[in-house]
């Protein structure tokens, strides 16, 4: 659906507004090409529906994306974790949703890296295929420029038949976190798995120790994955920076609160 395409852009968090702008311009061109006449030098704002309004809507949207990305179990586990955080935060500070929202956004991101299976799924979405038909003249030849990790880093040109490779790959997404995953030994896959397990361990460490005083630091920690953007060496550099910031925040999070000094008039007189 259109919503799933937009959600994929937002969860991936790379040039979100630029990608949405290009996508929406393509939709406009497909429906009414004349509408873009004279656009040179002007801009059309992308539709910027935020990740969601309230926390419930956000979680529902993310769970739908997780279900399409993986399966019902992945979506259910995501809901369970966010609900756990929301309950804990609500008991501590009535009406507060800062931490729950940070976890809802970040946990969805670390659970849905744009790997080979996801690229195939997104490519096969009817909306995307329809856009391609409108952007090129009838009879245009399709070529794919790809760098399959199993064939090295060099980009290679593939013909129209690769479409069926995407079909097969999208149906094999159930192998993503199993020993049968063909891409499990790639650096990108290992990095994605590290980010997921590390984030889950971080939540396990901080959740039992949250207080009203250190809640803002917990929120900052929960949002760190949103800084890890891009692919390859770009993502690696941002991950190192986020991990360094995590150590700084954890030291502050675990620091004992300063003792409260009570004024004693008798001691003052002495």
Image (cartoon, helix red, strand yellow):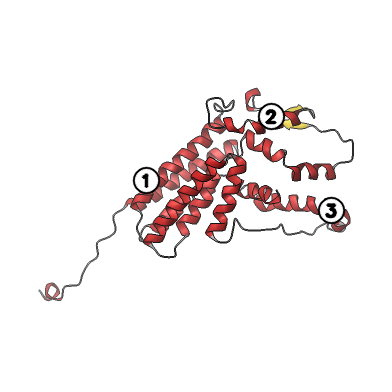
Q: Which residue position holds label 2?
A: 168
Closer to the N terminus: mark 3 or mark 1? Answer: 3
Measured from the top left, where is residue 92 in percent x and y?
Answer: 37, 61
Label 2 close to label 3 by CB (< 8 Å): no
> In terms of secondary structure, where does tag 1 sit?
helix
Q: Quadrant of residue 71?
A: top right
**Whole-Å distance between the Cαs marked 3 and 1?**
51 Å
Mark 2 lies on a secondary structure that is: helix
Which residue carries the number 3 mark? 31
- Do tag 3 and tag 1 residues touch (Cβ < 8 Å)? no
Q: Nearer the viewer, residue 115 or 241?
A: 115
Q: Is residue 12 left or right of residue 191?
A: right
Quadrant for the C terminus, please: bottom left
* Quadrant assignment, res 86: bottom left
Foreground residue among 214 and 155? 214
Numbered disc 3: secondary structure? helix
Q: Residue at x 39, y 45 (%)?
A: 204
For label 2, count other residues whose C-alpha is less than 10 Å away and answer few (under 14), some (14-19) or many (20+).
some
Determine whether 253 is above or below 179 in the image.
Answer: below
Q: Earlier in the sequence, mark 2 or mark 1?
A: 2
Residue 241 position, x and y percent, is: 49, 44
**Label of residue 205 in the image:** 1
Residue 270 is left or right of residue 152, and the answer is left
Residue drawn at 75 percent across, 46 percent down: 127
Q: CA distance from mark 2 to mark 3?
A: 31 Å
For image coordinates 72% across by 39% down, the residue present is 123
**Relative image position of residue 178 (x, y in whole percent):** 53, 29
Q: Is residue 142 left or right of residue 260?
A: right
Q: Residues within 10 Å of mark 1 (few under 14, many from 20)?
A: few
Spatial separation of the CA atoms under disc 2 and disc 1: 39 Å
């Amino acid at each position: 659906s259109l919503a799933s395409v937009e959600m994929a852009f937002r969860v991936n968090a790379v040039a979100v507004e630029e990608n949405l702008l290009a996508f929406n311009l393509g939709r406009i061109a497909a429906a009414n090409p004349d509408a873009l006449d004279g656009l040179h030098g002007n801009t059309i704002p992308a539709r910027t529906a935020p990740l969601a309004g309230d926390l419930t809507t956000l979680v529902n949207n993310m769970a739908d994306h997780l279900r399409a990305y993986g399966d019902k179990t992945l979506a259910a586990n995501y809901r369970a974790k966010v609900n756990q955080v929301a309950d804990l935060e609500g008991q501590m500070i009535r009406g507060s949703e800062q931490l729950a929202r940070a976890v809802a956004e970040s946990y969805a991101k670390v659970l849905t890296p744009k790997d080979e299976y996801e690229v195939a799924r997104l490519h096969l979405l009817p909306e995307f295929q329809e856009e391609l038909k409108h952007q090129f003249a009838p009879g245009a030849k399709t070529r794919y420029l790809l760098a399959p990790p199993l064939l090295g880093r060099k980009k290679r040109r593939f013909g129209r038949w690769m479409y069926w490779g995407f079909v097969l790959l999208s149906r094999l997404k159930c192998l993503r976190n199993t020993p049968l995953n063909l891409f499990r030994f790639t650096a990108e896959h290992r990095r994605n798995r590290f980010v997921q397990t590390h984030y889950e361990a971080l939540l396990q460490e901080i959740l039992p120790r949250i207080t009203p005083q250190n809640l803002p630091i917990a929120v900052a920690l929960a949002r760190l994955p949103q800084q890890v953007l891009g692919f390859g060496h770009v993502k690696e550099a941002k991950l190192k920076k986020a991990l360094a910031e995590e150590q700084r925040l954890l030291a502050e999070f675990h620091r004992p609160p300063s003792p409260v000094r009570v004024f004693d008039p008798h001691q003052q007189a002495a």
